[in-house]
Image (cartoon, rainbow, N blue to C red):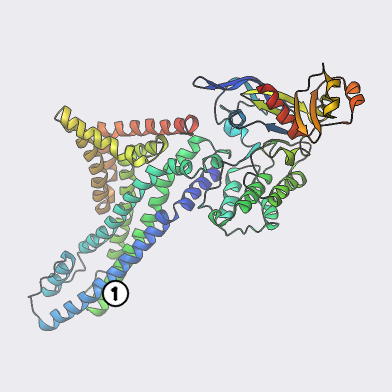
Amino acid sequence: MKSKMITQIKREFWECRSSFIKTPLVTTGILVILLVLGIAPWHYKIAGFISQHSVGYTGNSDLGFDVLAEVAGQQSVTTDPAYLIHGLTAVFSVFTVILLLVLLFYFADTLYSDRRDQSVLFWKSMPVSESETVLSKLTAGVIGAPAVYVGAALLTGALFLLSFLVYAGSVWKIPVPDMGSVLAVFFKCALGLILGWIVLALWYLPLFSWLLFSSAFVRKTPFMLALGLPLALIVAEKWVLGSHQLFRVLREQIGSGLYNLGILVHDPLALPERITAALAAPQFLLGLLVSAAFLCACVWLRKNRWEI
Amino acid sequence: MQTVIKARGLSKSYGSTRVLDGIDLDLMPGRILGLIGPNGAGKTTLLKAILGLAPAQGELAVLGLNPHTQRTQMLQEISFIADTAILPRWLKVKQALEYMEGVHPRFDRAKAEVFLQRTEVKTNMLVRQLSKGMLTQLHLALVMAIDSKLLILDEPTLGLDILYRKQFYNALLDDYFDKDKTILITTHQVEEIENLLTDVVFIRQGKLCLNSSMEELQDRFVELQLTDDQLAKVAGHTPIHSRPVLGGKAMIFEGGDREFLRSLGPIKTPSLADIFVAKMHGEKS
């Protein structure tokens, strides 16, 4: 049973190899290249700056400016590794945005793609129930793909810290934080990212389930339903009632997920408080119920209406 | 011995069209049943009902299980190839093997690999790289490596050339079939499976118009060829079908007085294809 679920999730990774594995790896590659390209010019600018003892430099990067300010003041940055957190957060944000886009496309397509390429009867000739199929697809999207993205984000973050510290220490010759506090920053952010994703995924579950439902429901072009219906309802509500409740609810749901992720990356210890806050929000609880309803509907559709 | 498929009064309608109309069927283990019918006769609907893919009214048990409500359990003992059940193009052959090994308790990976070694299919190939013939070989290798009790084949050789078709059926008989296994097969190429079958069912407009073992078929149908001037002799004995042949007519009789017919001229057992045409034609007229 356990191996069946793992095989089902592997199946999703085989099918979505580019978006689940290649994309985060390519993102890592691009960010590392940008990092190297970014650090090298800095090096020359700062080297020039230090040699001239000039204060005329106006870097537009907060990060660079912080460092420059520290350097200009001849202060040690040892006691304040906060600027490292900014860098890590920026790296993690890139991965989060890409992952959310990938999941938008994945969930809106996954219960439709096997009907489109006519492989549905092959999958249906296997002793796998529809609940197992739907659950494995949800798991692949909520846990599987994010695990790869979190891994890639942490790898990029670690490379970022490492190259920054090497440059700062050996090339710029400025005092660097001790290894202990660097590791502390890194692991704090890493833990925050993992916990933040879990809380975000719980807030986003109704959205993911809606996308899955759309992909199970439609005859073709699931995006028309997945994005078109909410959009049409928002417009209709505005016209008919003059209000924008649905838009507000959706914005809150999406915003809450990102907000929690942002808080937890900076402070993973806020988890109990974030969970409590979520459970105290009727919208969050209602979202979980709506998710369950959409997922049950997916299973029913797969069992009874797959021919559409 | 447990009946593999047992159907009583199986019916299904799409709107006002009745696609299955009171089908009764018993299929015992160790048999190879051919389900033959013209397009739109209800073959696929019947297979879907048996596979639990579409609900139908009436009584239906497959290996003693309800195909709709006990589908997952049933599929551990049933395997299935359909022309419409195609392997996904993004799948690699080795992934197909790994997948089946992971989800199917009765799949023997080593066996499938042996079958594949006899073909041109390589395990690191993508399904999209395979020709139609190789694809069928792969699907057959996967399915034959399942120790299933019932194998359902829906037009399995559609679009294949004659070499692949022969190979397909030979492999099926040599490497898969034994007395504990049962095969249900639908095809338009009646001639090719005629020698394979132990039983045959004709379906027309949702009804079974023939349900017989192949041995019974020989006793039941007779073909008699008469020249035009002999035709008057069979007056009173109505053939179910007659077709013109050089200088006369070939007539197929169902039941009938075999000794009398023999006295008129050479008789023989008609081919399955001829019986099929006769039955379909007969029902129409």
* Left or right: A142 as drawn, with respect to A7: left
Density class for disc 1 (Cα within 10 Å; few <14, some 14-19, many ≥20) is: some
Q: In the current view of this chain or complex, which residue is farthest to the bottom? A: A51
Where residue B68 appears, as percent x and y from the top left, is: 56, 27
Which chain contains the residue that carries disc 1?
A
Q: Is residue B84 visible?
A: yes
* Left or right: A159 as drawn, with respect to A69: right
Q: Quadrant of residue A27?
A: bottom left
Residue drawn at point x = 38 percent, y = 58 percent:
A23
Q: Is residue B224 visible?
A: no
Q: Quadrant of residue A253?
A: top left
Residue drawn at point x = 14 percent, y = 72 percent:
A68
Where residue B231 appears, as percent x and y from the top left, is: 83, 24
Vertical arrangement, residue A141 with respect to residue B47, above or below: below
The quarter of the image holding the C terminus of chain A is: top left
A273 or B258, nearer to the observer = B258
B187 or B127, nearer to the observer = B187
A46 or B67, nearer to the observer = B67
Q: Quadrant of residue B229?
A: top right
Q: Which residue is mark 1?
A: A166
A106 or A276, nearer to the observer = A106
